[in-house]
Image: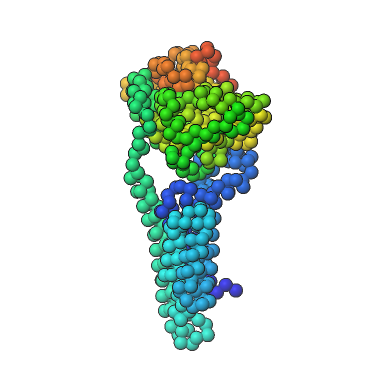
């Protein structure tokens, strides 16, 4: 039999659990010290690969929300269990302090154990202990069946107890809301990113790209450069690793003539370049939004690679990031790569691999390892994280011409402007062709000026006068004269192909 007071305790404990998670979030924000993170990571690791792949394909971003929601629920449940124990101890000993101690110390141990961060754990422990301390009532204050005096007033007492309990739970939920709001306010007040070391030339490159850009009617369309906050993001982990420039180093290991470790100061001392490089994710839909371009500040990998004398039968390397990500591809592809510490003139933001990531010209996004920590020269080929999950995304990108939703604009004089970006990796884009009659006739679109960069997208624009509904089709021809593949395929396993078709008018 569950007694009334056990019901009450379960209710209070659930509120304490929610308050503990909110308190942790308030103190740590969306960082590795947040108690939800290790639980989320465990859930992701425990989920079999095929399910992860299917979830990404069918649910997209909703898949992330689902596993975060599950992790939040598990975390709240664990803290609720600790708070429940605290309330029971208080009831058994008739001492509020004993319950507060169990809930407080227990939550602190749980949070510190999960995250390894002791001060941040106070954020979880204090709210949980407070709910237990304020919510618990001694048995003299609660109705009891065998006390005739209490039974006489019992309905008044029950009401008082109920009011008290609801008040505490409402207070806890109010705290959850306030913590989330306070966090958001703190985050929006964050300082803008500082300039990247040795980024002086980046502003000139950004200006050059702006000059090369087409002018288009739509305000919501990126020009030649994607702003840092709008550049797409693909991460295997829900939380970015926190690595300072001072802590960072890159180690070359495995089949080398001599191993080598490079630290941040040494890296930024090397010859600096500011390259425009476009990234596209192999997992995106044909006309999906995971295609962006930035000016990156960094240094070429080739001289570093030559200095370690790569050996090994497969001429291949495994790159690893601080988040546990890994990807393998040929050494001669790596040799054309770039180690970047700056993005659009600013320090590389944490979401894009702070402090150092690799950029591999012309290959799918997954080769561009963020938070890069190790390059291991292998003797035998091995699968990377995504290849273990069925993808074949380490090769060269396919040619694509996008017709963005935001790129379809009515001009007011009856005409319609169509605009987008086209990308073919290091092959470059020679031209973009547009058909407004379902593919019968084709016209060359206007293109942004060609740039010296080896691996950068081009903007395209085409204005036409619709007479009723039209099927618009867009296709690109790469710098080698090869027409974009017409037959549509999905993104699995090696990237979406086909011509983008839209009904307009
Ligand atoms: N360490 C690490 N590097 C990574 C990933 C990751 O999850 N972890 N995702 C890869 C994938 S699939 C893509 S498409 C690009 C995306 O880079 P972005 O998030 O800077 O746009 O990073 C690649 N590098
Ligand atoms: Mo990707």
Left of 282 or right of it: where is 48?
right
Does the rendering let one see residue 345?
A: yes
* Residue 99 % position (x, y): 48, 71
Residue at x-position 39% and y-position 55%: 179
- Quadrant of the image containing the C terminus: top left
- Quadrant of the image containing the N terminus: bottom right
Task: Give the camera-side residue of 490 and 129.
Answer: 129
Residue that lies at the very extreme toward the bottom in this rendered image: 148
- The correct choice, above or below, for 53 with respect to 77 in the image is above
- The correct choice, above or below, for 472 with respect to 491 in the image is above
Which of the 4 image quadrants contains residue 199? top left
Does the rendering let one see residue 60?
A: no
- The correct choice, above or below, for 242 with respect to 289 in the image is below
* Residue 232 % position (x, y): 46, 34
Number of marks: 0
Which of the 4 image quadrants contains residue 173? bottom left
* Residue 448 % position (x, y): 39, 18
Residue at x-position 43% and y-position 51%: 28
Residue at x-position 47% and y-position 56%: 118
* Residue 7 % position (x, y): 52, 70
Residue at x-position 60% and y-position 36%: 385
- Please, which colouring scheme is shown? rainbow
Task: Give the camera-side residue of 129 and 175.
Answer: 129
């Amino acid at each position: 039999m569950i007694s009334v007071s056990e019901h009450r305790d379960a209710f209070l404990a659930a509120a304490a659990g929610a308050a503990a998670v909110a308190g942790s979030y308030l103190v740590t924000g969306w960082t590795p010290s947040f108690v939800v993170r290790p639980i989320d990571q465990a859930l992701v690791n425990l989920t079999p690969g095929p399910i992860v792949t299917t979830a990404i394909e069918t649910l997209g971003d909703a898949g992330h929300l689902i596993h975060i929601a599950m992790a939040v629920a598990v975390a709240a449940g664990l803290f609720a269990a600790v708070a429940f124990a605290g309330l029971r101890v208080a009831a058994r000993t008739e001492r509020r302090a004993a319950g507060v101690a169990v809930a407080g110390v227990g939550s602190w141990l749980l949070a510190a154990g999960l995250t390894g961060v002791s001060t941040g754990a106070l954020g979880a422990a204090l709210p949980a202990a407070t709910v237990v301390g304020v919510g618990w009532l001694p048995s003299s204050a609660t109705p009891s069946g065998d006390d005739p005096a209490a039974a006489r007033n019992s309905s008044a007492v029950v009401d008082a107890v109920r009011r008290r309990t609801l008040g505490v739970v409402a207070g806890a939920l109010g705290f959850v809301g306030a913590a989330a709001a306070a966090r958001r306010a703190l985050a929006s007040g964050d300082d803008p990113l500082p300039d990247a070391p040795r980024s002086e030339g980046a502003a000139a490159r950004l200006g050059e790209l702006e000059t090369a850009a087409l002018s288009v009617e739509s305000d919501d369309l990126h020009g030649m450069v994607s702003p840092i906050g709008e550049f797409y993001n693909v991460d295997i982990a829900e939380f970015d690793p926190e690595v300072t420039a001072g802590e960072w180093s890159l180690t070359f290991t495995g089949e080398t003539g001599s191993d080598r470790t490079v630290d941040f100061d040494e890296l930024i001392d090397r010859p600096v370049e500011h390259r425009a490089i476009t990234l596209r994710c192999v997992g995106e839909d044909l006309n999906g939004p995971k295609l962006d371009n930035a000016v990156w500040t960094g240094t070429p990998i080739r001289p570093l690679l030559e200095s370690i004398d790569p050996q090994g039968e497969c001429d291949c390397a495994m790159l690893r990031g601080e988040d546990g990500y890994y990807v393998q591809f040929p050494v001669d592809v790596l040799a054309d790569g770039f180690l970047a510490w700056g993005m659009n003139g600013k320090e590389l933001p944490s979401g894009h691999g702070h402090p150092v990531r690799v950029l591999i010209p012309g290959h799918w996004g997954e080769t561009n390892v963020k938070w890069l920590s190790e390059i291991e020269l292998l003797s035998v080929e091995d699968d990377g994280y995504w290849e273990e999950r069925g993808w074949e995304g380490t090769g060269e990108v396919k040619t694509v011409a996008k017709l963005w939703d935001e790129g379809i604009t009515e001009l007011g004089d009856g005409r319609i402007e169509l605009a987008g970006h086209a990308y073919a990796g290091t092959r470059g884009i020679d031209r973009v062709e547009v058909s407004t009659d379902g593919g019968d006739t084709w016209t060359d679109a206007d293109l942004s000026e060609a740039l010296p960069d080896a691996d950068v997208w081009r903007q395209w624009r085409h204005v036409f006068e619709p007479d009723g509904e039209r099927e618009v089709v867009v296709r690109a021809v790469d710098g080698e004269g090869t027409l974009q593949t017409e037959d549509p395929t999905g993104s699995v396993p090696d990237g979406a192909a086909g011509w983008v078709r839209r009904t307009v008018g």
